[in-house]
Amino acid sequence: MKLHDIFKKTKTIVKNFRDTVAEASREPEYPSVEPIREEGEKTQELVLRISGKSVAKATIIILSLLVLAYLITQIADILVVFFVAFLLAAAMEPAIDSLNKKKIPRGVAVIFFYIAAVAILGFIVAYILPILAQQISELAVNLGRYLKGLAQGQQTGLVPLRFQPYVQQFLKSINV
């Protein structure tokens, strides 16, 4: 086959393709909503046939998606653990690489970071948690006093006047 013949065939293919695209891109003619029919004119019916094979495929796909969703809900806890582990590994990676460049073995660097994480967690538990617990207990006591005062009509600062009777009635009903 010569190069000239290849160019002719390519030109024919491109021309046919261009004609097909031009024909497809023409604006379709939409029939009016209620066509006017003359007496004796035949009407056309549109029949849609769905094979059993396509129904079976659609059913299998839907059932597969449902089974997949069920499995994901069952292993959600495991996926969360893997996600957290991946985040920790990604966060530690740059620091471990820099320690590895300073001739510290990778295993030792990982153990160092785990010890540091446990130490930080211990600090939080030892120093911050008691303060947080004290603040929460004070909040509970003060909130109880505020709600009792609100139920008795003494505290009116935060509740608008038009809502005070409703709030007092609600607080009395739950026995603050």
Image: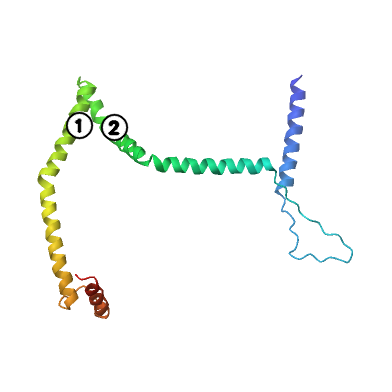
Which quarter of the image is occupied by the N terminus? top right
| Quadrant position of residue 161 | bottom left
**Residue 111 placement, left or right of 54:** left
Where 22 sits versus 153, above or below?
A: above
Foreground: 67 or 45? Answer: 67
**Image mark for residue 89:** 2
| Quadrant position of residue 62 | top right
Residue 170 at least partly seen: yes
Instruction: Calculate the distance from the C-alpha at mark 1 to the C-alpha at mark 2.
Output: 11 Å
At 72% from the left edge and 45% from the top edge, which residue is drawn? 22
**Residue 96 placement, left or right of 77:** left
The kind of secondary structure element at disc 2 is helix
Q: Residue furthest right?
A: 40
Identity of the amino acid at label 1? Tyr
The kind of secondary structure element at disc 1 is helix
Residue 105, given in percent of the width and then of the height, sits at 21, 20
Where 135 sits versus 76, above or below?
A: below
**Image mark for residue 114:** 1
Q: Are marks 1 and 2 in contact (CB under 8 Å)?
A: no
Foreground: 96 or 154? Answer: 154
Identity of the amino acid at label 2? Ala
At 76% from the left edge and 23% from the top edge, which residue is drawn? 4
**Residue 73 placement, left or right of 57:** left
Residue 64, given in percent of the width and then of the height, sits at 53, 40
Foreground: 14 or 58? Answer: 58
Which quarter of the image is occupied by the C terminus? bottom left
